[in-house]
Image (cartoon, rainbow, N blue to C red):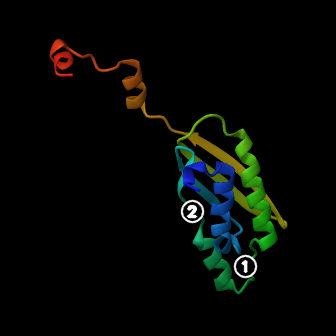
Amino acid sequence: MSQEMVPLARQVDVALRKLEDELRGLSAGTIVLQIRNDVIGKFGIRHLPLDCEERAATGEKQPGMTSAQVDSLRRMAVEALTHKKSWTHGEIAYDFVLRQGKVYVSVQFESNYNMANLLFRLHPKQRDRRDAVND
């Protein structure tokens, strides 16, 4: 099955499963998915390693997500796709934080359009007589 035939929800699920090892142990961050033609290209996590370093320096146990909390985050990320409307190019950012053992997620959708493509459709190239003769 080609990647274009895989629904975006399934792609989000696969991407977050791939990130699971990195997500476990984090207490906050942003998951970023770059989308083109409803296909995830690049994806990853932005987080502050300084937070982890400070805890390690003080000898504190690092509070971070468990596997069950990562599963909950993944389910919320897939469910949030119901709010994505009609656009096929852009970015989805899932901001997450772990507070008192509960995962909270907010989602930001960014749609991208290419003006050159829109103008090309509105004003097709004008052909002169020389172009028509050469056809």
In the rendered view, would you say 36 is above or below 17? above
In the rendered view, would you say 22 is above or below 82? below
Task: Give the quarter of the figure containing the C terminus.
Answer: top left
Query: Furthest-bottom residue in view?
Result: 59
Q: Residue at x 61, y 79 (%)?
A: 53
Q: Secondary structure at mark 1?
A: loop
Q: Residue at x 64, y 84 (%)?
A: 57
- Amino acid carrying mark 1 in the image: Gln
Label whose residue precedes the other's in the sequence (1 or 2): 2
Q: Callout 1: 10 Å neighbours few (<14), some, many (20+)?
A: some
Lateral position of residue 117 relative to residue 85, left or right: left
Viewer-side label of 1, 2: 2
- Amino acid carrying mark 2 in the image: Gly
Q: Residue at x 63, y 62 (%)?
A: 15
State the residue position of label 2.
Answer: 44
Q: Residue at x 56, y 40 (%)?
A: 88
User: Residue 56, position in %: x, y?
Assistant: 66, 83
User: Residue 98, position in %: x, y?
Assistant: 77, 64
Lateral position of residue 5 relative to residue 61, left or right: left
State the residue position of label 1.
Answer: 62
Q: CA distance from mark 1 to mark 2?
A: 21 Å
Q: Quadrant of residue 33?
A: bottom right
The one nearer the camera, 31 or 89, is 89
User: Residue 114, position in %: x, y?
Assistant: 43, 34
Task: Give the quarter of the figure containing the N terminus.
Answer: bottom right
The one nearer the camera, 43 or 95, is 43
The one nearer the camera, 54 or 20, is 20
Q: Quadrant of residue 75?
A: bottom right
In the rendered view, would you say 54 is above or below 41? below
Q: Secondary structure at mark 2?
A: strand
| Residue 66 visible to the viewer | no
